[in-house]
Amino acid sequence: KAGVTQTPRYLIKTRGQQVTLSCSPISGHRSVSWYQQTPGQGLQFLFEYFSETQRNKGNFPGRFSGRQFSNSRSEMNVSTLELGDSALYLCASSLGFTGQPNSPLHFGNGTRLTVT
Amino acid sequence: AQSVTQLDSHVSVSEGTPVLLRCNYSSSYSPSLFWYVQHPNKGLQLLLKYTSAATLVKGINGFEAEFKKSETSFHLTKPSAHMSDAAEYFCVVSRGNAGNMLTFGGGTRLMVKP
């Protein structure tokens, strides 16, 4: 079974631009969640989608948005990029709701975004 | 509210010696607890999970963790370190069976010396 696939692996953007990251979950998984990882802040939860509905949202500004399609694939978008948005963005999928003990997260390898 | 504290940001051991990575949590609910490992430029991989069925949990690659409610701890151990264990490890808590946002610890970077 294919794992979680994130594209692209690397991105370089300039301040003020916008970016879209893509995530394809494991087949059959209905939950997709997104995390931002930086050396200073560690792993921070962005949002979770389940069956095309946003179920939970972390404490990030409105410039960060996401969506999930009917095939469970998900995209996240960051508008008006800032230098501080440089990070590794990780997507994870699970069979059921995120955090349920019998529904552990399976992570992709991430998209490394550099904002210059 | 819930939180996770990984007590050591870096741990260094020699190959073949035991590994102990410490994690304390706080949760208002019966927690589910997980350990994940992250190798450089990779995503996180699940090592093991605690789901209240047994306090001693066995995971992949010879790792174990023991849930101690009285100490609110969930330390990760391995009897004998291997070079391939060098990575960053994350202790994670979620709110029991409710299925909710995960809270990640700050991570412990494990270095293994030959």
Image: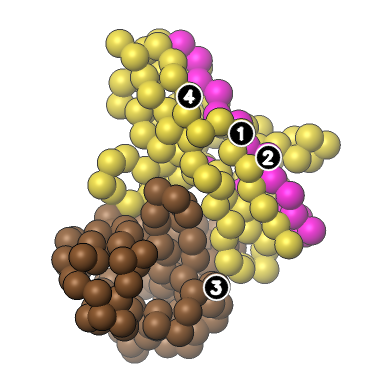
Chain colours: A brown, B yellow
Q: Are marks 3 and 4 on the same chain?
A: no
**Quick check: marks 2 and 3 in contact, CB under 8 Å?**
no
Quarter of the image with the C terminus of chain B is top left
Which label sits on residue B24? 2
Identify the element where label 2 is drawn. strand
Distance from Cα at disc 2 to Cα at disc 3: 23 Å
Q: Are marks 1 and 3 on the same chain?
A: no
Q: What amino acid is found at the position of numbered circle 2 in the picture?
A: Asn
Q: Are marks 2 and 4 on the same chain?
A: yes
Mark 2 vs 4, N-terminal side: 4
Which label sits on residue B7? 1
Q: What amino acid is found at the position of numbered circle 1 in the picture?
A: Leu
Q: What amino acid is found at the position of numbered circle 3 in the picture?
A: Asn
Q: Are marks 1 and 4 on the same chain?
A: yes
Q: What amino acid is found at the position of numbered circle 4 in the picture?
A: Val
In this picture, is A69 found above or below B44?
below
**Quick check: marks 1 and 2 in contact, CB under 8 Å?**
yes
Mark 3: few/some/many CA within 10 Å (<14, 14-19, 20+): few
Reading the image, the residue beneath label 4 is: B11
Query: Residue at horizontal 68%, vertical 61%?
Result: B95
Reading the image, the residue beneath label 3 is: A59
Identify the element where label 3 is drawn. loop
